[in-house]
């Protein structure tokens, strides 16, 4: 699955999720505002959904659900923080190299134009980075 935003008719990819992972719009959950994020299935999958009232009700009945929800929110925050930091500080090459180490599944499963969107670079830039790495190996 891919979480996307659309700006000027162009899809901007925020995150990917595969087997055993989850996607959420925690901002929308907290503010109770409709989500601007779209979730798109990229492969055949089974999806389990829960809305805010359902999660709150389950949490009130089962403390482990509330604890699990809290841990998921912490995970989402940390992942979001790391991603924003990388987009602000790291070069395109560094972002791609980190992706290859941290999420090698994406490099194998996701089309290049979607990876480029996720890395906030143009597909041509990603092609140049991949060519450079192929010629010189993993660059520091």
Image (spheres, rainbow, N blue to C red):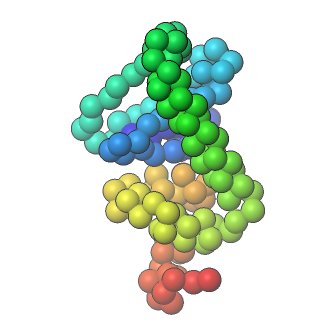
Quadrant for the C terminus in the image: bottom right
- For the view shown, which residue lies furthest in the right direction? 89
Residue 98, percent from left and from top: 56, 67
Do we see residue 138 in this rendering? Answer: yes
The quarter of the displayed image where residue 14 is located: top right
Residue 32, percent from left and from top: 64, 14
The total number of labels drawn is 0
Q: Of 70 and 10, which appears nearest the observer? A: 70
The residue shown at (41%, 64%) is 104
Q: Of 96 and 23, which appears nearest the observer? A: 23
- For the view shown, which residue lies furthest in the left direction? 44
Image position of 70 with respect to 77: above or below? above
Residue 50, percent from left and from top: 43, 19
The residue shown at (47%, 26%) is 64
The residue shown at (54%, 71%) is 97
Q: Is residue 52 left or right of residue 78?
A: left
Residue 124, percent from left and from top: 53, 66
């Amino acid at each position: 699955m891919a979480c996307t935003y659309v700006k000027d008719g162009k899809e901007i990819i925020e995150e990917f999720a595969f087997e055993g992972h989850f996607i959420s719009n925690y901002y929308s959950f907290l503010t109770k505002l409709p989500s601007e994020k779209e979730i798109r299935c990229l492969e055949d999958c089974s999806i389990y959904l829960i809305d805010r009232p359902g999660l709150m009700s389950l949490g009130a009945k089962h403390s482990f659900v509330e604890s699990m929800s809290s841990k998921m929110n912490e995970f989402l925050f940390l992942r979001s923080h790391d991603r924003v930091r990388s987009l602000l500080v790291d070069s395109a090459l560094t972002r791609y190299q980190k992706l290859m180490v941290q999420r090698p599944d994406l490099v194998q499963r996701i089309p290049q134009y979607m990876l480029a969107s996720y890395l906030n670079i143009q597909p041509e830039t990603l092609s140049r980075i991949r060519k450079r790495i192929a010629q010189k190996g993993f660059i520091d």
